[in-house]
Amino acid sequence: MASAAYRAGERLYSSYYGEVSDYTKKGGVIASEIMLPPHAPEIYLDRATLWNAVESCEKHPKAQLAYSFDIAMQNELTLEENMELARKFVQEQFVAKGMIADLAFHSPEKEDGGIPNPHFHVMTTMRPLNPDGTWGQKQRREYLLDEDGNRIRDKNGDYVFNAVHTTDWHEPETLEHWREQWAAAVNTKFEEKGLDVRIDHRSYVRQGLDLIPT
């Protein structure tokens, strides 16, 4: 809840923790919005309702509640172009896969050297939504079977199983795909505008460049 309040520059109350997070005086927030897949209840368009629901369905005190991404906007594009590009990317890569996405656009004060640092934050839900709009499971049990197809028990008499993720959202390959798709979307926009500039989602090392990131 605190993370959502900070990114959106809002005052939100967490029912789970009984705490208020107030970032209404935080500057630099241009806009924020929540994007829903078709089967998500519209009540989750309210930020407090959404993240209170997420917090309430997790039982473990150390459970991860959301995926979080911080993505740079491009100084070569207008604010409107950047926001349109971000929304399209979030819709195609996250919302279309069943995630609820909490999106916030920031344009903080210019940093040392006078270079603007516009960027956007995305927080997405980790649990898939069932067709009826209820929260699904992050993992399911896959029981081990003997040669006759019967479930195997351990020495304590409990069935042996593997915990299998219900989505591939946690996979390193999925994160790599998202990074690659963002770079492709930005470069397509650059090409459309006739700009002779490109970005690469790979590190300098992977690109074979002897450079130090700034």
Image (tube, rainbow, N blue to C red):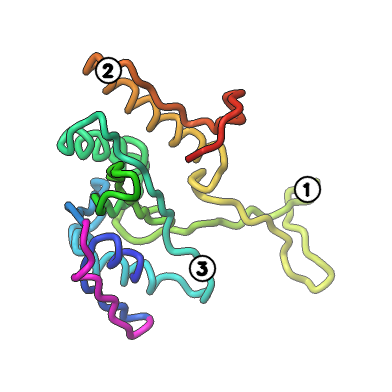
Q: Nearer the viewer, residue 26 or 60?
A: 26
Q: Indicate left or right for 151 with 173 as reference.
A: right
Q: Earlier in the sequence, mark 1 or mark 2?
A: 1
Dominant SS of magenta comes to loop
Residue that label 3 marks: 63
- How far across and down, in percent of the image, does residue 99 sit? 35, 49
Q: Nearer the viewer, mark 3 or mark 2?
A: 2
Q: Nearer the viewer, residue 140 or 147?
A: 140
| Residue in view at x 61 percent, y 27 percent | 210
Q: Earlier in the sequence, mark 3 or mark 2?
A: 3
| Residue in view at x 77 percent, y 59 percent | 152
Q: State how many labels appear.
A: 3
At label 3, which amino acid type do we have? Answer: Ala
Q: Look at the image and tell me in which quarter the N terminus lies.
A: bottom left
| Image quadrant where residue 84 sits | top left
Residue that label 1 marks: 148
Q: CA distance from mark 1 to mark 2?
A: 64 Å
Q: Nearer the viewer, residue 116 or 80?
A: 116
Q: Secondary structure at mark 3?
A: loop
